[in-house]
Amino acid sequence: MTETTPVERVAALLKNAGFRRIPIPLSIGGLQIDAAAAFVGVSPRPDLIVVGDTLDQTPARLQQTVEGVGRALDMMGSRRPLTLVVVGPRPESSTLTRLSRHARVLPVGDASDRSNLENWLAVLLPLKLPELQESRADDAFDKLIQGSRDPLERELIELAHAGATAVSSRLAVRVDEPFVEANDTGARQ
């Protein structure tokens, strides 16, 4: 299926990011709330995302939707963050201000350019970290070792390849050494 409408382009991006589409009308605490689309995330992104379309919904209707969802979540004692993604012509600033009292509002427009859409929805999407380049990591390691004059610092830098547990364990032993030696000396006397 091709993503022909802005709502479907948003839906495709959110589904690829791991959000699950939920049936419309939304059913929260026995209330039925209509929206263009809705998604729910899982930990660590537990957002409830409601998609509103300004071509199909008036500003008043968008406000009713977001207020209804917000109230229903409150009644249920939910701690899910609520995000409203608005597609279509951008509402007036005053409308966006009213909507933002109840949810995080992301006005994405017609969402025709995937890159632009990803930028607007970046707060909802997982970070894409650059691939680790082994040569850069080795260069950084070499510079750290060369710049280190303290034997303990050098030892901990070299242990970094073994992981955080190795570093913290060795550091704990080194911190305890003076106290253990003092105890051993006192016990002998």
Image (cartoon, rainbow, N blue to C red):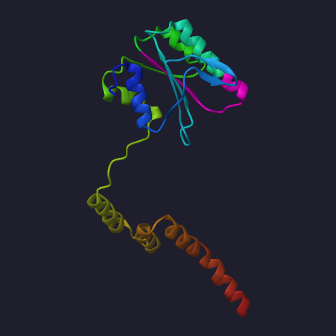
Instruction: Name the spot of residue 185 as percent of width and height, x first.
Output: 67, 88
Q: Residue furthest bottom?
A: 188
As for residue 77 lying within the magenta part, the answer is: yes
Residue 65 x %, y %: 58, 15
In which quadrant of the rendered view does residue 122 lie? top left
Which of the 4 image quadrants contains residue 11?
A: top left
Q: Nearer the viewer, residue 177 or 186?
A: 177
Image point 55% across, 42% down: which residue? 44
- Farthest residue in the left direction? 135
The image quadrant of residue 118 is top left
Quarter holding the N terminus is top left
Q: Nearer the viewer, residue 173 or 40?
A: 40
In the image, residue 60 lies in the stretch drawn in magenta: no
Q: Which of the two residues, 49 or 169, is positioned nearer the viewer here?
A: 49
Could you tell me residue 120's position as x and y percent? 40, 26
Question: Going by the picture, which residue comes out furthest to the front?
Answer: 1
Quadrant of the drawing holding the C terminus: bottom right
* Residue located at (30% from left, 24% from top): 113
Percent position of residue 186, x then y? 72, 87
Above or below, comparing residue 177 to residue 148 in the picture: below
Q: What is the magenta range? A: 72-87
* Residue at figure coordinates x 52%, y 9% from the top left: 95
